[in-house]
Image (cartoon, rainbow, N blue to C red):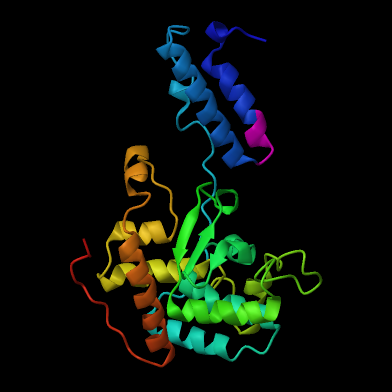
Amino acid sequence: RLAITEIEPADVLGAIRKIEGKGNLESARRTLQLASAVFRYAVATARLASDPTRDLRGALTAPKVTHYGAITQASRVGELLRAIDGYEGQGFTKLAMLIAPHVFVRPGELRHADWNEIDLNAALWIIPAEKMKMRKPHHVPLSRQAVTLFREAQAASGPSGYVFPSIRTGTRPMSENTINAGLRRLGYASDEMTAHGFRAMASTLLNESGKWHPDAIERALAHGDSDKVRAAYHRGAHWDERVMMAQWWSDHLDMLRNGAEIMPFRGRPAA
């Protein structure tokens, strides 16, 4: 063991490289980030002259960014929604595919949805922090269409437990590949449309509409904010706008499903 004053950049990099060498690129990045925080605290409390990780920025292999297949053209969204309406496979798979476009949460958050998180009378779904990628609770306003679909799911699954239970046992959620398998059955290749693609679909078309503040869209997608002060300020912001946006989006999806050709509206974002 080395005293903190004896640790050199090469010592830190060597330890991080071991994690990186196992293919755990994100863990390596987070470990370096945590180590840097410790060293910065030591500097601030006069235990250390400088942070040895300061010169290691850019030294690690960046995690590969995954691009998910997504349909973002309005006319093709309508085709997809009509295809889902005609899905003849397992009932919960169809319900998950029907609900996904309206709530555009991450696939894991959708399949792990539990009835104790959802208040259909209040049209609100509160996803607990432990289920969220950013480890913060996420409030999802539900449109009238989403509430109707959730009620249909509740009639099938019962009032408690998972909204989308496994076909093998009700004590587990549907598998992580279920929605993707349903999309493949409908004829959509993995580079064309995925379960994660419903998020990109919503993000693209909501932004193109010009009707909604970009921050409201980011809040709806539960994206993190690199500026911690801004993130804290906006945590509860844009809620009323998000409620209106959720209903507008579901109405928009209905129009696309019915074959309407919607041209992007380049207006001023809502305040």
> What kind of secondary structure does the magenta stretch mostly adopt?
helix
Q: Residue at x 51, y 20 (%)?
A: 38
Using residue 177 as the reference point, say whether residue 254 is left or right of it.
left
Camera sees residue 192 = no
Residue sitting at the far right: 168
List x then y, in percent, for residue 56.
48, 25
Using residue 159 as the reference point, say whether residue 224 is left or right of it.
left
Residue sitting at the far left: 268
Quick one: 253 or 141, which is closer to the camera? 141
User: What are the residue bounds of the magenta stretch?
Assistant: 18-23
Using residue 245 as the reference point, say whether residue 118 is left or right of it.
right
List x then y, in percent, for residue 141.
43, 67
List x then y, in percent, for residue 11.
59, 17
Camera sees residue 259 = yes
Q: Residue at x 63, y 73 (%)?
A: 179
Q: The C terminus lies in which quarter of the figure? A: bottom left
Q: The N terminus lies in which quarter of the figure? A: top right
Quick one: 182 or 60, which is closer to the camera? 182
User: Relative to 7, is 182 above or below?
Assistant: below
Quick one: 149 or 45, which is closer to the camera? 149
Quadrant hosting residue 180:
bottom right
Q: Residue at x 58, y 65 (%)?
A: 110
Residue sitting at the far front: 121
User: Relative to 98, is 38 above or below?
Assistant: above
Q: Is residue 108 magenta?
A: no
Q: Residue at x 65, y 33 (%)?
A: 19
List x then y, in percent, for residue 60.
53, 34
Quadrant hosting residue 150:
bottom right
State the count of labels: 0
Quadrant hosting residue 14:
top right
